[in-house]
Image: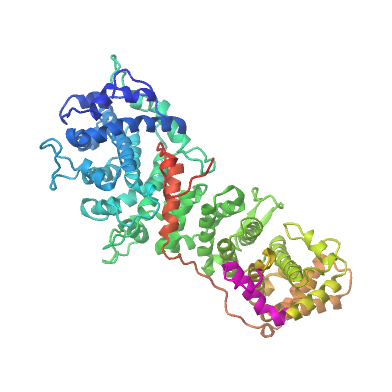
Amino acid sequence: MGSNSSRIGDLPKNEYLKKLSGTESVSENDPFWNQLLSFSFPAPTSSTELKLLEEATVSVCRSLVVNNPRTGNLGALIKVFLSRTKELKLSAECQNHIFIWQTHNALFIICCLLKVFICEMSEEELQLHFTYEEKSPGSYSSDSEDLLEELLCCLMQLITDIPLLDITYEISVEAVSTMVVFLSCQLFHKEVLRQSISHKYLMRGRCLPYTSKLVKTLLYNFIRQEKPPPPGAHVLPQQSDGGGLLYGLASGVATGLWTVFTLGGVGSKAAATPELSSPLANQSLLLLLVLANLTDAADMPNPYRQAIMSFKNTQDSSPFPSSIPHAFQINFNSLYTALCEQQTSDQATLLLYTLLHQNSNVRTYMLARTDMENLVLPILEILYHVEERNSHHVYMALIILLILTEDDGFNRSIHEVILKNITWYSERVLTEISLGSLLILVVIRTIQYNMTRTRDKYLHTNCLAALANMSAQFRSLHQYAAQRIISYTCRHLRRYVYVLDKLYFPHYHCSTLQHCFSTLSDNGEELLSLTCSHILRSYASSLFSLLSKKHNKVLEQATQSLRGSLSSNDVPLPDYAQDLNVIEEVIRMMLEIINSCLTNSLHHNPNLVYALLYKRDLFEQFRTHPSFQDIMQNIDLVITFFSSRLLQAGAELSVERVLEIIKQGAVALPKDRLKKFPELKFKYVEEEQPEEFFIPYVWSLVYNSAVGLYWNPQDIQLFTMDSD
């Protein structure tokens, strides 16, 4: 690319690049290519330098776009690379550093050119540039060889067949990156692509047989987390005459290129990410997610998704059904360990979700593990730090929990795992708590955060569904977890009374009641300085009496208002009234969760009964509520039964004595007195057309996390860029 150029800014002036992109045809056998590929310059080490490289490349590419139909130089460059890859495996075995270095440089140039070509032209134009065959100037032949397909097949072979050594590490990363770039046409379309060159080449033809081998290799790259070679692992002799433009790219591996890898990609959307220890693992995971989320072709399903859905454990000796294509085996223990260790990144969490949701072999294996805390704790930590995570990462973590809680064995086992000193949980010192109780605390905290900040119905519905799935299996709940279940329910009960108060008596409502509710803190502690609970109870009772006559009309109005379908004669409800449906939904679900626990495992949860009795005044107010009357029967029975036993025991009882009475009462309470309700069970089901969510999400991860790749944010159409 240029004998004396050593800076990115010199690229447009470089004589070798000028010749590549100029009007003169260069034969694939010309010595020019050896000079071009012996290049060296300081590798970009920041998003600013990557941007400069992009801008420099654009000017060269635009010249090549104009001239390539006449020169065919792009095709010649690709043929030079293809011919070299045939000897790459032997070169690796023979430790031929120079040959591998130059082959890497050829791929690096191709990747840079391809990225700009894809951004700046249609797929039809792109294919014309890759199907050029030297016959007569400016002519294209319909039966000419398709270099793009040949290049893709070659990249797949390179990724899957070349042994991963110090001298092949960077070309392996570059091969994965080039495949990501090939698929990046999606970035420049607002709509999800359902027919594209990706479908044409990757789902049929010569590339299809590599499907399972590629998916397996990418998974193992993620599992192994291979680090780049250490400084000085392979150093080439310096050229005396300066050589090509990027000569030091191989000899300078230790100084430049790996700095790019450890700094990560560009983009303002992602939070600060920790230093990447394995660029190859990161890039492989991103490519795997992109492939897995390609839409199905018109005449066949996505083979990469099929491979991800069907692979089995290496210890599983049962034969694959003949109906399953692209099948392979992988070490599940290694996969599980890697997934547990890598959950700090969005892409690892998305992979975990994908495997749990789509691969029944993986899901069965994980649910049978006896060390589930290694997987669940990182997921809980994501939810706990919800303020610091993007919403998609939180969704994925939450859906993973929902999928896990569909299994009764999981719901039982998490209460048997005892954890000590959870340092990241800061609300209260937890010296010893079960994994199940910690999960409850984190999920309730997530619901609370959502209800007070983001107000996302999808999120709180899935949180409540996870708690509901667990509720029948609650065992030995930690006192703080039991307290939070009850106090969170009470917070919404109070809020509900307050909304009704404002709804029915907007001008004449009780000022004391309004003051009390306005002093409610976010953590849902009981009302401050409210000593006249009997007045509140009487007031709530009269509200519910009124509500029983008008309840359906109120909810109908609130629903219509939320949907914007009020008639011209209706007066729109205020904001607080529009919250009525949401509050009632949360209350109903929390009461069902409490009821499920009391009905199925009351004798295992004295702390929950204790917390319920402590707040019994508030629950008693809702026994006549038309929406909660049925579910309140069992709760009211438990409150009445245990209150009576405590009254018989006398006054001034210690906490220990109260718990002892509760444990004795739990044995004495006839179970047939508790009304049976249908089991609470919720199952995660993907929305229709899930690609509308996942494809933009995956590409946002590529944009923010891909190693050494930069796209101009102004060109991105698939998702909205942050303003900063």
Judge whether residue 246 can be spotted in this image.
no
Q: Farthest residue toward the top?
A: 240
Residue farthest front in this picture: 568
- In this rendered view, identify the residue nearer to me: 565 or 711: 565
The C terminus sits in image quarter: top right
Pinpoint residue 263: horizontal percent, then vertical percent: 47, 35
Residue 481 in the figure: left or right of residue 403: right
Identify the image quadrant of residue 302.
Answer: bottom left
Left or right? Give the position of 533 relative to 555.
Answer: right
Residue 429 vertical placement versus 538 (above, below) = above
- Residue extending farthest to the right is 651
Magenta region: 547-572
Q: Which secondary structure dominates the residues rendered in magenta? A: helix
Q: Position of residue 339 (x, y in %)?
A: 47, 51
> Residue 259: horizontal and vertical position, in percent?
44, 31
Between 704 and 170, the one nearer to me in the picture:
704
At horizontal 54% and vertical 61% (from top left) the residue drawn is 401
Q: Check if residue 548 falls in the magenta segment.
A: yes
- Residue placed at 27% from the left, 21% from the top? 15
Query: Which residue is found at the position 58% from the left and 80% from the top?
Result: 678
Rendered view: 243 above or below 697: above
As drawn, the residue found furthest toward the left would be 135
